[in-house]
Amino acid sequence: MSLTMINMLVDLDERLWSRARPGLYRETLDRGVVLHERQGVTPSQRAWLRGTFGGLWSDEVSTGYAWFATDWEGRELGFAAYDCKLDFPWLRRWRAQPDVGIFGPMGVAESERKHGLGSLLCLLALQSLQRQGYARALIGAVGPEAFYERVCGARRVEEFPRAQVVGAGLQHVLQSVATGKWRNR
Ligand SMILES: CC(C)(COP(=O)(O)OP(=O)(O)OC[C@H]1O[C@@H](n2cnc3c(N)ncnc32)[C@H](O)[C@@H]1OP(=O)(O)O)[C@@H](O)C(=O)NCCC(=O)NCCS
């Protein structure tokens, strides 16, 4: 495992969808995937996020917006969040820039990967940031660098120690325990 993590930046311009496979949106709907965008998370989405990805993602996504994908029966398949508000040190200087929106986290259930769902959810969330007027999006604490390069042309803009991410996670847990939020998750 690498000892460093990176931040990536994406230009939200007219080329946003240019790398997507033609027909990706239609094909995804045709195989029965349902897409919807919402603010925060439902209790069952929170439980799915916690059970599938662990860590802080369920807390993080509950503070922002996300595109979710489900099957016809409502089972969660994937998500891509944006505008989440947890305060992480590696995001601070980017949040201060008015033309930069904050993307992530995102994830796809293991059984659903490699069919293009990650690409589609990523592009939908970036497009939502674009529609809010942001010119660029920051993808923090990555993760699958080649995936983001491939899907949206994101480029690496800085590198920082993985320990910073672990430390921020611990701090969030301690704060949640102190305020009683952890018990009610
Ligand atoms: C990263 C992730 C969202 C990709 O979802 P997915 O549905 O498999 O993505 P897609 O099928 O749209 O893949 C698009 C392309 O990226 C490539 N790709 C997918 N996952 C990749 C990875 N982890 N690293 C590098 N390339 C990857 C695919 O091979 C595909 O390339 P192709 O079009 O040339 O075939 C998924 O693997 C995941 O949930 N991982 C765990 C959570 C995670 O790491 N989230 C990101 C946090 S920063």
Image (cartoon, rainbow, N blue to C red):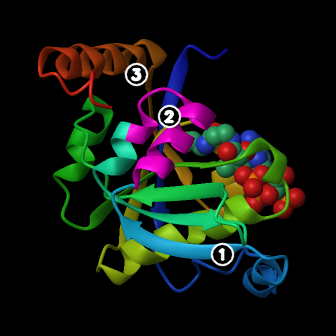
Is 63 in front, or is 118? Answer: 63
Task: Mark 1 or mark 3: name the one nearer the start of the chain.
Answer: 1
Residue 109: image tag: none
Would residue 79 be found to the left or right of residue 7 on screen? right
Residue 119 sits in which quadrant? Answer: bottom right
Q: CA distance from mark 2 to mark 3?
A: 11 Å
Tell me the amino acid under the disc marked 1. Answer: Val
Task: Give the residue displayed 46% in from the left and 73% down from the top.
Answer: 37
Q: Is mark 3 within 8 Å of ligand 1?
A: no
The image position of residue 18, as x and y in percent, is 68, 80
Tags 2 and 3 touching, CB below 8 Å: no
Q: Is residue 21 visible?
A: yes
Q: How far from the left and from the top, in percent, is residue 30?
A: 83, 84
Query: Which residue is identified by label 3?
Result: 165
Between disc 2 and disc 3, whose residue precedes?
A: 2
On the image, the x and y values in percent for residue 158 come to: 43, 36
Q: Is residue 44 magenta?
A: yes
Q: Earlier along the polypeptide chain: callout 2 or callout 1?
A: 2
- Quadrant location, the C terminus: top left
Q: Between tags 2 and 1, which lies in front?
A: 1
Q: Is residue 23 left or right of residue 162?
A: right
Marks 3 and 1: in contact by CB < 8 Å?
no
From the viewer's perspective, is residue 1 above or below residue 84? above
Task: Return the residue at label 1.
Answer: 34
Mark 1 or 3: the one toward you: 1
Q: Which residue is mark 2?
A: 6
Q: CA distance from mark 2 to mark 1?
A: 32 Å
Q: Magenta segment range?
A: 42-58
